Image (cartoon, rainbow, N blue to C red):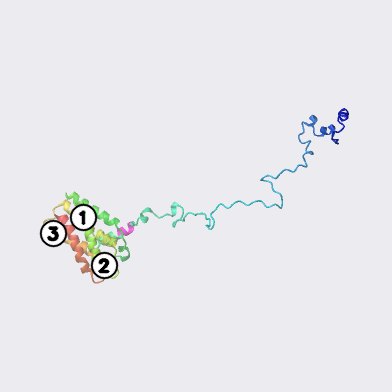
Amino acid sequence: MSGFDSLNPDFYQTSYSIDDQAQGTYDSNNAGDPYSNKQQYGNYNYPHQGGLSTPGVMQPQQPYTGQIYQPTFTPTAPQSVYGSSFEDEPPLLEELGINFDHIWQKTLTVLHPLKVADGSIMNETDLAGPMVFCLAFGATLLLAGKIQFGYVYGISAIGCLGMYCLLNLMSMTGVSFGCVGSVLGYCLLPMIILSSFGVLFSLQGMVGIVITAMIIGWCSFSASKIFISALAMDGQQLLVAYPCALLYGVFALISVF
């Protein structure tokens, strides 16, 4: 270096010495300890990353992802009326409105004409029993060689419509079409007995006429008794029994002829 300084007397003079590079060179003796030179980098100020925070410095808040002026809510599942478990749910027949106890009580009321009818039960719209009785009546006619299913259901529908209009005019409370169909269908049970007799012997003789007249009176009396008890029509049983007798007389004609 002294020879270089003598050749260039005008060169910029500095206090830098080549001996200072020894401080920055890598020492092979410290190769086994990578943390031996940590004093050299201790004063370096690294920028803070996302997970580290300096005390006293407010971190940016997360952006709002919802819609403005519209509150967010978490939908909840609707609670069942009968509970969340299958054990608390009602039976399927009860959900369908089929009660075998009421069906049996209505059947006994029809079979026993002198039994007092329960107006609360008879006022129910129960069409399960009437459908079964109409099907049984058509089946007994089929056993006698008469395919009359269409006439049975057609006459039943027309008769229910006529009785519905008549009872709404006669009663103060009114009645539903389902209730009329339920009562008339249950009172068709004695007519099934008549058609069953027609399978065994002919009903066109004197004995058959007498049995047919008794069955018509039985059906009309039972139906009128139920109607006056359900609709509070005291003293009007004969007025209600007459159109019922006309309706069941048509079914009797189908059974006899």
Q: Residue at x 19, y 61 (%)?
A: 247
Residue 87 horizontal side relative to residue 30, left or right: left
Q: Quadrant of residue 151?
A: bottom left
Considering depth in this image, is 256 or 37 the residue closer to the camera? 37
Q: Residue at x 17, y 59 (%)?
A: 250
Image mark for residue 209: 3
Residue 170 horizontal side relative to residue 208, left or right: right
Q: Does 235 lie within the magenta span?
A: no
Residue 13 place in picture, x, y as percent: 86, 35
- Image quarter where the N terminus lies is top right
Residue 232 place in picture, x, y as percent: 28, 70
First of labels 2, 1 by sequence position: 1
47 is higher (above) or lower (below) than 116: above
Considering depth in this image, is 36 or 70 the residue closer to the camera? 70
Q: Which residue is mark 1?
A: 152
Q: Which residue is mark 2?
A: 168
Question: How far apart are the two marked residues, 3 and 2, measured between alpha carbons?
Answer: 33 Å
Can residue 182 be seen here? yes
| Residue neighbourhood size for the residue with mark 3, other residues' Cα within 10 Å, grouped as few (<14), some (14–19), many (≥20) | some
Residue 177 horizontal side relative to residue 63, left or right: left
| Residue neighbourhood size for the residue with mark 2, other residues' Cα within 10 Å, grouped as few (<14), some (14–19), many (≥20) | some
Span shown in magenta: 100-104
Can you name the residue that lies furthest to the front here? 10
**Which amino acid, by three-letter code, is at mark 1?**
Val
* Badge 2 element: helix
Can residue 114 be seen here? no
